[in-house]
Image (spheres, rainbow, N blue to C red):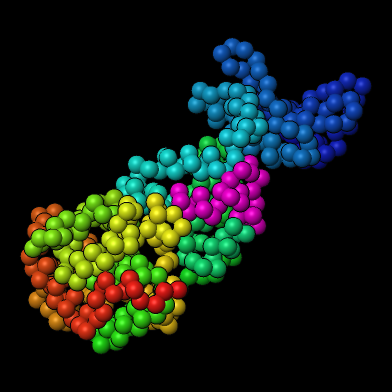
Amino acid sequence: MALTDAEVRKAKPADKRFKLYDGGGLYLMVETNGSKLWRMRYELAGREKSLSFGPYPAITLAAARQAREAARAELRSGGDPSQTKIARRLIATSTDNYFEPIARAWHQQQLPTWGSPKHAADVLGSLEKHVFPRIGKLPIRDITAPMILASLRDVERTAGETAHRIRQRISAVYAYAIGAGLADADPAAPIGKALKPVTRGKQPAIVKLDDLRAMLRHVEANPAHAVTKLANRLLALTAVRSNEVRGATWTEFHGLDGPAPEWRIPAERMKMSRPHVVPLSRQAVEVIDAVRIATGRAPFLFPNTRNPRRPMSENAIGYLLNRSGFHGQHVPHGWRAAFSTIMNEAHPADRAIIDLMLAHENKNAVEAAYNRAQHLERRRVLAQAWADMLLAGATPAVDLLHGPAR
């Protein structure tokens, strides 16, 4: 007959220790000193073995029954719950149960599913920068929601959406750890609502040509690092994503002295994981020639000011626009919106080619599979038309090297 809570609670010590049976091998051992311990008897390969679940009342009758059912399930699958418990105890006393090595193991497991090396590097980089310094060297079971929230508050002050993404990554690490028996719960799960909500919508962009020209002139006249100004101009001329400009290396540029200069961005640096060819206008080549004077010895066209072996900060161009007075009016991604709006109005028959220039994904799966035409010659014509419109009356690129600096 199964035990009741009252029987367990009222069990008194005797001259000899004794057992109260609950069924399925579970029993309560009552010691002569009054302590009570939950144990389970089971057989494996013809040998009798026992397993301890912990003391009562710390382990309730209900909790002991749950532990018994878990052990029986493990036995049915061919495992030995005693050996599993020993393994978990060893893990608990090892640095391998710290958050950082578990997060790195999770990251390694996910690599084949992500496809893009760039995305994989971004995920690990965000944890290395914002999470590991705070909680990486703590046992994963000891980390609390307030600890995680404190790490994310630092990120939230400058990048609210990034804070939410990092929280999701921490939760994914905990899901991996729970499945491996290294954690029991996800303390990152409930703090999503403690972070400021992210308002998503169209990113700010100036899309009228005259206003766009005036904005670019104003930005380039402001005191700022010349290389950042040149990065912003190349971004404007090519309408690629800002990460693609930031990470541009000299080896990606071809035929700069010839009639058909190109920027060949490899698949691993593209959002859609497809290589992208950018025909370069005369003005874009002038930007590249100008920046070569300043950074030609570094691997990147636009290196980090503190470490030339790393690309420019992801916020550099955005900060340039903000400091120039365009906060909330135009962001780096806004150059893509401006290019799309103005060029589609000027060349409505070229809508599909303009989408191709923006490296947009073709929503028609059949067409995407069969129509792989690059239309490079027409794209080259449109790129030059855009550059001529945008930079009419603009300062020559090389002169930006000698403009006002911060």
Which quarter of the figure has residue 388? bottom left
Image point 38% across, 43% down: which residue? 111
Q: Which residues are magenta?
A: 124-148
Q: How many marks?
A: 0
Image point 41% across, 62% down: which residue? 314
Which quarter of the figure has residue 304? bottom left
Could you tell me what secondary structure mostly forms the magenta stretch?
helix
> Closest to the observer: 14 or 241?
241
Is 185 displayed left or right of 111 in the figure? right
The vertical placement of 382 against 271, above or below, is below
Is 123 displayed left or right of 287 in the figure? right
The vertical placement of 332 against 49, above or below, is below
- Residue 142 in magenta stretch: yes
- Residue 390 in magenta stretch: no
Image point 14% across, 73% down: which residue? 384
Which quarter of the figure has residue 380? bottom left
Q: Is residue 158 visible?
A: yes
Quadrant, the C terminus: bottom left
| Residue 3 drawn at (x, y percent) | 74, 34
Image point 40% across, 54% down: which residue? 308
Quadrant, the N terminus: top right
Q: Which residue reaches farthest bottom?
A: 210
The vertical placement of 43 against 115, above or below, is above
> Closest to the observer: 326 or 400?
400
The vertical placement of 222 against 11, above or below, is below
| Residue 127 drawn at (x, y percent) | 50, 51
| Residue 195 drawn at (x, y percent) | 56, 66
| Residue 361 drawn at (x, y percent) | 22, 61
Is 137 displayed left or right of 125 in the figure? right
